[in-house]
Image (cartoon, rainbow, N blue to C red):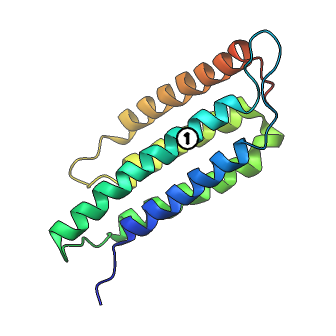
Amino acid sequence: MKLFSGRIAFDTLMLAASAYGLWLSTKLPSGGGISGIGPSDFPMAICALATLSMLVILGQDLRHEMVAGDVTERMTVRQILGVCGVAALLALYLFCLEPLGFIAATMGFLFFCAMSTGWLLTPSDESFALTRTAVISALVAVVATLATFFSFSYGFGLIFP
């Protein structure tokens, strides 16, 4: 009996999560008033896009799995540490979001995720120097967080924790 790779299992899990998010977004109140845009529109669009994307990715991975056969790559210890580190950072981010607020928690999360993935998930011969990775990670964290905060706060009128 041939087992599918972990990639297929991950794709299926992500497809189920995005479809569940799409279903949940239909339970939010719909828009009203002049603009017609409501609290459900943005989550519904994102989850619909994610569901469609995951269907395409799952189809491609299944097709590749059938053609490639039994070619599977084992994850290195360094890559496993990277995946576990990002999962731990995500849990810490969710825990710190309320007490620290969106801006501080998100900047910290993005910075440490970029640092850990830059160091742990890339092969050691291709890794940037630690200071260069830190500067790029800090820049990405600050710009992405502030752009997200201002676009959602002033563009959509949302209030962040």
Q: Residue reaching furthest bottom? A: 1
**Between residues 158 and 3, which one lies in front from this camera angle?**
3
Q: Residue at x 82, y 19 (%)?
A: 32
Instruction: Using a 10 Å C-alpha cutoff, classify the residue at mark 1 as few (fewer than 14 neighbours), some (14 to 19) or many (20 or more).
Output: some
Q: Nearer the viewer, residue 62 or 149?
A: 62
Q: Amino acid at mark 1?
A: Ala
Residue 122 at x, y percent in the picture: 30, 52
x, y percent for residue 149: 67, 22
Residue 110 versus residue 56 in the image, above or below: above
Quarter of the figure that contains the C terminus? top right
- 110 left or right of 7 in image: right
Residue at screen point 48% across, 28% down: 140
**Residue 125 position (above or below residue 64):** above
From the image, tell me which residue sits under label 1: 48
**Residue occupying image coordinates x 59% and y 33%:** 45
What secondary structure is marked by label 1? helix
